[in-house]
Image (tube, helix red, strand yellow):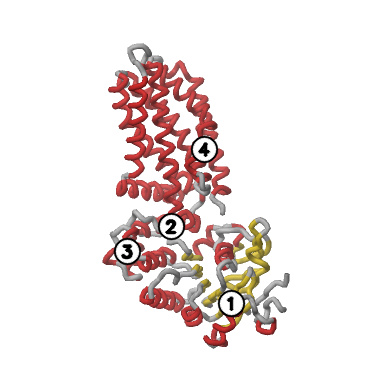
Amino acid sequence: MRQYFSQVAAIVWKDLVTELKTRELFSTMFVFSVLVILIFIFSINLSIVKATEVGPGVLWVAFLFAGTLGLNRSFMLEKENGCLQGLILTPADRTTIYFGKFISNLVFLLLMEAFILPLFMVFFNVDLLAHLGSLLVVILLGTFGFCALGTLLSSLSSNLKTREVMLPILLYPLMVPVVIGSVRMTGQVLEGVPLSTMMNWVGLTLCFDVIFIGVSIMTIDHILEE
Amino acid sequence: MTETTHSADTEGAIEAEGIHKTFGVQAALRGISFSLRKGEFLTIFGPNGAGKTTLLKILAGLAKPTRGTARVAGFDVLEGDPGMKRQIGVIAHASCLYSDLSAVENLIFYAKMYGLGRPEERAVRAIENVGLKARMHDRVRTYSRGMQQRVSIARAVLHDPPILFLDEPFTGLDPQGSNNLKETLRALHTDKRTVLMTTHDIACGLELSDKVAVQSKGRFVLYEDACNLEKHRFEDLYFEILADRLPAEKTAPGGPGR
């Protein structure tokens, strides 16, 4: 078991070192999500519409679209020079590849979100600090589900010529329950509603997170097979 | 279709029995059988599309045969046992190296994936062995094809496997790089490793090998001890096979005429 975790950690370490050297993934995701927020800011009249009503949708659109860019890149890195083949040739269980990539994607996306939240707070004039704890739980739940399913589907679509198109086509419909839950919870948290009163949404999102991880564990072996 | 069969006497490091592989209606392998004893070096020649890479992929556990069985280091390749993966090293067409990591970072990563102790030490030693210590901290994308191939060899033997699969390792190398690789392979073979290599380089293949096979259209049409073959005679035979006009009497024992 110790070796299993050290193999997962090795994949995360490899992805972090690569990103530290290239800074491709983070910069792409960050710039893209800033642009999304800016476009919405200029198209929404915040003197008419309440920021806490439109803000959560904008925030999650920025997270998901930027995250999709990151996911597309994630398995492409493994396809270059046949690295995925090199990984499959090691005695490591194939779920280590999934969990390594999943944790890397989660770390990159959470990091990007940490940079986006202050900008969102400034642009939408919303006080996030008052509800920071609840907001972080909601963001973690939504991002977890997105990365769990996204990592699986990016491994699947990485074999396709039309991978950039196929990933969102496969991912977004399946993400609907988690996205709805995350947007609703974010809206209520920004309104000052305590998280304890929306346990049905928390439960729903958590449930899908677990399902996505379970399905990934069951199918990754077949997906990575040639 | 008659199956090619080549039996060896004892201690099979690699044993293949009636391997077929089809992709849709296209047959890539049509019943390949052979066995290789520990420490033997087999080179498989053959035109592009003969199914050499497919055969190597099946033996390395990267693909499953449509029909037939194969055992590598005593493990059934169909079972995908991690124990088998510890016994084999593979040098494929692609380098399997991360371009933005240095050579040493690549090898540390693979050492961790193989669960080897002291990955840093192992990685540095492996790089020293292929003569790249001076540039081990440079990104792999800055290396020449020959240098990448040397790192790829270091990666393949990092866990000291007794069996090596080499898929056209001489491709893209200049004469100097080719000579260096030949010396490295000779050294690896001297360490009593079993080697199965595919190549188009007749001179290198004949020089390094104990056994030689020619694969065409998914079958072995020749399987001989390398010492029984003269280079010129083999070249003539090989080019006839490439031109698809091999006379029946020239096929080796176990060939299609059998």
User: Alpha-carbon distance for marks 4 and 3?
Assistant: 37 Å
Judged left or right of residue A199, residue B147 is left
**Residue A81 numbered mark, or none:** 2
User: Alpha-carbon distance for marks 1 and 3?
Assistant: 36 Å
Which amino acid, mark 4? Ile
Q: Nearer the viewer, mark 3 or mark 2?
A: 2
Judged left or right of residue A167, residue B151 is left
Are tags 2 and 1 found on a single chain? Answer: no
To which residue does mark 1 refer?
Answer: B213
To which residue does mark 4 refer?
Answer: A213
User: Alpha-carbon distance for marks 2 and 1?
Assistant: 28 Å
User: Alpha-carbon distance for marks 3 and 2?
Assistant: 22 Å
Q: Are marks 1 and 4 in contact (CB under 8 Å)?
A: no
Callout 2: residue from which chain?
A
Which amino acid, mark 1? Ala
Can the viewer see residue B72?
Answer: no
Judged left or right of residue A160, residue A62 is left
Q: Quadrant of residue B139?
A: bottom left
To which residue does mark 3 refer?
Answer: B124
